[in-house]
């Protein structure tokens, strides 16, 4: 069967990286299709053919963001102790949300803060994404209890919620102008409460 249309003349990952930045800077509601096509260097038919509609493009951008900008999560979960998991996760998060040349804060936090009722699918998607990340922390902390690294009186769900909440707070603070040094002080203080 013959291929229809012209071959794609742009790099998908590069275009998606540009979409990540637009959504990250402007949020889901603040981003128009014109913003996306301009930043990605493509026209609307190419955007629809490669990524689908705006919501589909956003979902793919969030997945790309998780793969690239949140790669530290894998390193954190691989740490040998629960404390090292929390320390690596939060320290790396503070670095990620204050990376020079990138928008401050976190796409998955900033992206949905201003989504309205008409964007409930986006709000639900972001909540599910955050819950999925939190579940990975729960599973890791359960393993720490099973291995004797954490006392069996520790509640993995509470520890995961704590780390997730501090992480989200770091992102919001960064978006509000907090420096990396200020966030590192918060991380150090937060880790005092971690077993």
Image (cartoon, helix red, strand yellow):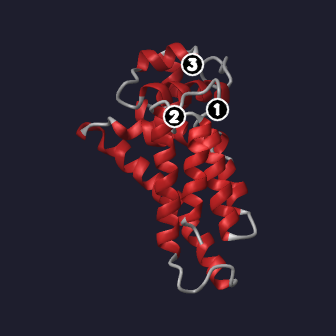
Closer to the chain start, of discs 2 and 1, is: 1
| Mark 1 element type | loop
Q: Estimate the x, y position of residue 38 in percent, counting from the top left.
A: 51, 13
Q: Position of residue 93 (x, y in %)?
A: 61, 46
Mark 2 burial class by Cα count in 10 Å: few <14, some 14-19, many 20+:
some
- Point out the image quarter for the C terminus: bottom right
Q: Residue at x 53, y 31 (%)?
A: 104
Q: Residue 133 has which mark? A: none
Q: Is residue 57 visible?
A: no
Q: Nearer the viewer, residue 30 or 86?
A: 86
Q: Label 1 neighbourhood size at 10 Å, few (<14), some (14-19), many (20+)?
A: some
Please give the count of numbered marks on the rendered protein.
3
Q: CA distance from mark 2 to mark 3?
A: 29 Å
Relative to 172, is 97 on the left or the right? right
Instruction: Find disc 2 in the rendering and name its residue.
Output: 178
Where residue 66 appears, as percent x and y from the top left, is 60, 45
Q: Position of residue 99 (x, y in %)?
A: 64, 32
Q: Which residue is mark 3?
A: 40
Mark 3, Cα crowd under 10 Å, few <14 / some 14-19 / many 20+, is many
Residue positioned 51% across, 36% down in the render: 174
| Between marks 2 and 3 in the image, the one whose residue lies nearer the viewer | 2
Q: Is residue 28 visible?
A: yes
Quadrant of the image for the N terminus? top right
Name the residue that disc number 1 marks. 99
Sequence-first tag of 1 and 3: 3
């Amino acid at each position: 069967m013959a291929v229809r249309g012209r071959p794609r003349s742009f790099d998908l990952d590069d275009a998606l990286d540009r979409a990540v930045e637009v959504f990250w800077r402007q949020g889901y509601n603040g981003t128009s299709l014109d913003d996306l096509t301009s930043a990605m260097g493509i026209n609307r038919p190419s955007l629809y053919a490669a990524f689908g509609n705006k919501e589909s493009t956003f979902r793919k951008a969030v997945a790309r963001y998780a793969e690239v900008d949140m790669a530290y999560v894998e390193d954190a979960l691989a740490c040998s102790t629960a404390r090292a998991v929390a320390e690596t996760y939060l320290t790396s998060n503070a670095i990620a949300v204050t990376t020079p040349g990138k928008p401050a804060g976190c796409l998955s936090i900033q992206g949905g803060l201003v989504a309205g009722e008409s964007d409930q699918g986006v709000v639900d998607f972001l909540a599910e994404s955050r819950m999925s990340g939190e579940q990975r922390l729960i599973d890791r902390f359960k393993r720490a209890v099973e291995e004797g690294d954490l006392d069996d009186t520790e509640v993995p769900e509470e520890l995961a919620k704590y780390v997730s909440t501090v992480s989200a707070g770091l992102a919001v603070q960064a978006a509000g102008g907090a420096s990396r040094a200020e966030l590192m002080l918060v991380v150090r203080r937060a880790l005092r409460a971690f077993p």
